[in-house]
Image (spheres, rainbow, N blue to C red):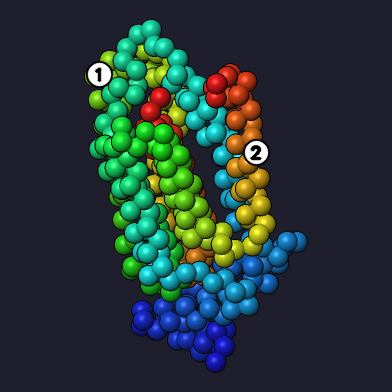
Amino acid sequence: MSEQTTAQVEHEEYEAQTEHGGHDHPGERTYVGIAVILAVLTAAEVATYYFEDQLGGLLVPSLIIMMIVKFFLVVAWFMHLRFDSNLFTRMFVSGLFLAIGVYVAALATFRFFT
Amino acid sequence: MSVSEQTATAPAGAVPEGAAHVPHDATTPAHHTSTGLSHEKLAMWLFLGSECLLFGGLISTFLLYRTREVTAGPPVGDIYDIPFTSVSSFVLLMSSLTMVLALSAIQRADHRRARTWLLTTALLGSTFVAGQVYEFTTFVHEGLGYTTNLQGSAFYTLTGFHGVHVTLGILMLLSLFVMSLRGRLPAGKAETVEIVGLYWHFVDIVWIIIFTLVYLIPA
């Protein structure tokens, strides 16, 4: 069997296995689009380094927002949490929120925020 | 013609790579588990959830020590090379794109392209690690060793742990590449690539946080 036919059989088999689950991963074009957004956000983050004085009080909030957006884009699209079972989301978010809660409390104990 | 029929009618010795197959889709009924989900994938998500606690601890420790006065050596914030680290960050970010492209290719049973993207991801990861080694070397020459001050210790521990995670990810990617070369990574085993991809993307999101909190936000 030629390599192309083998690949076709494999792909059809894969499609047959996944057709019931609605595992609707995005296409390559979408992935590239997300990567472009991530690149633009990274460029914007780096730009804040050169405009630190002009941004003043906006510097930290803008950096935090861009960080959260980038985090969300990778988790939702590249890690497919947007398309997969909610149980995976719950597993990850539980760990994430537990970590945030524990360490915000720990930092507050050490008067980090004052 | 069903897939099994196609396989059955294939010439002898031409059984497709995907014949002995592990179901891919986590939500597919093909997963005969108590949850109906892939337990391997569930375990990876659980592991990643626990990793949040590890990196949360390391990041918090760094943030705490960063504000303390240093008694010896330079403060770590004074010797950052932001343009250099920005390029490293960009390289790691783009490795997440090549990783999903590898997964997409393996799902289409396009093995040649999948191998190309896997190798590209490993190379981008290696570039990031090489950049980190260069950064550490520069910092040591600037007078900031691992035990010079608390800031330095916390910085090297945090970024070093992350670097070790990236290195482990590279080893996993190279293992997948070799498996694919030997014909042991059929489209039916795309979930294996997806699980390694989850780990790789996690390493990327940890760096997204480190880059902002450690490098870009001033002390």
- Residue shown at the point (49%, 65%) measured from the top left: B190
Residue B206 coordinates in the image, percent (x, y): 47, 41
Residue picked out by circle 1: B142
In the image, residue A98 sits, relative to residue B7, either above or below, namely above
SS type, badge 1: loop
Q: Residue at the location (57% across, 84% down)? A: B4
Amino acid type of disc 1? Glu
Query: Residue B143: image x %, image y %?
Result: 28, 15
Q: How far apart are marks 2 and 1 (CA)?
A: 37 Å
Disc number at residue A98? 2
Element on which disc 2 rests: helix
Query: Which x, y percent locates residue B209?
Result: 45, 40
Residue nearer the viewer, B210 or B192: B210
Residue A35, numbered circle:
none
- Output the chain of dot 1: B
Q: Counting other residues with Cα less than 10 Å from the Cα at mark 2, is it few (<14), some (14-19), or many (20 or more)?
A: some
In the figure, B88 relative to B215: above or below? below
Spot occupied by residue B122 in the image (x, y as percentages of width and height): 34, 50
Quarter location, residue B151: top left
* Quarter assignment of residue B154: top left
Whether residue B22 can be seen here: no
Q: Is residue B74 left or right of residue A76?
A: left
Q: Are marks 2 and 1 on the same chain?
A: no
Task: For residue A63, say whether it is visible.
Answer: yes
Residue toward you, B16 or B130: B130
Q: Which residue is drawn at 41% across and 68% down?
A: A30
Is B148 left, or right, of A19 in this rendering? left
